[in-house]
Image (cartoon, helix red, strand yellow):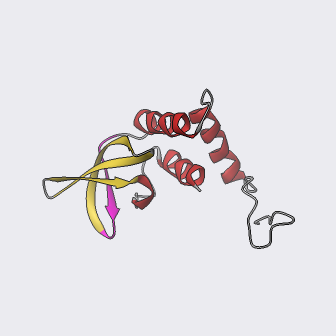
Amino acid sequence: MTRVARGRPGRRDRRPTSRRNRSLGKLIEKATVDCYDADEAEGGFSVALEENVPLPFPAKVVGEDVEVRGFDIVSGATVARCVRKGKEYTVTVLSLEVPKNLPGRKWLEAYRLFSR
């Protein structure tokens, strides 16, 4: 169920409504607990991803297989360092398609929710 914020037609209320989103909300709180602004929160999430998502792991970016080797912050956004056919690429974490059984996947889902 999606709630719509009153007084703002077409805009969704970002409060987690499902049990799944509440658990992701707890991960967001954990990653950003001591952060004072958006830059610190982004940094907190970058560290949380490094600590909680086992590296390297397979993923897809625009349908192509890559291996994710780490996370960094570039221009205020968390990015993934990926390798494909021996060449290194940097892509936004939001563009990763990860396996459903990936340990730590919930952290990537929490980042996706946080980034909205």
Q: Residue 68, image x and y in percent?
A: 30, 49
**Farthest residue in the left direction?**
86
Which residues, given as a range, are shown in magenta? Answer: 55-63
Residue 76 lies in quadrant: top left
> Could you tell whether 47 is left or right of 66 in the image?
right
Name the one closer to the observer, 106 or 37: 37
Q: Which residue sits at x=70%, y=48%?
A: 22
**Farthest residue in the bottom direction?**
10
Residue 77 in the magenta stretch? The answer is no
**Farthest residue in the right direction?**
6
Residue 58 in the magenta stretch? The answer is yes
Please state, as top left, top right, bottom left or bottom right, where the N terminus lies in the image.
bottom right
> Could you tell whether 26 is left or right of 17 in the image?
left
> Could you tell whether 3 is left or right of 90 in the image?
right
Name the one closer to the observer, 72 or 22: 72
Q: Residue 10, image x and y in percent?
A: 75, 73
Please state, as top left, top right, bottom left or bottom right, where the C terminus lies in the image.
bottom right
Q: Residue 46, image x and y in percent?
A: 44, 38
> Could you tell whether 49 is left or right of 64 in the image?
right
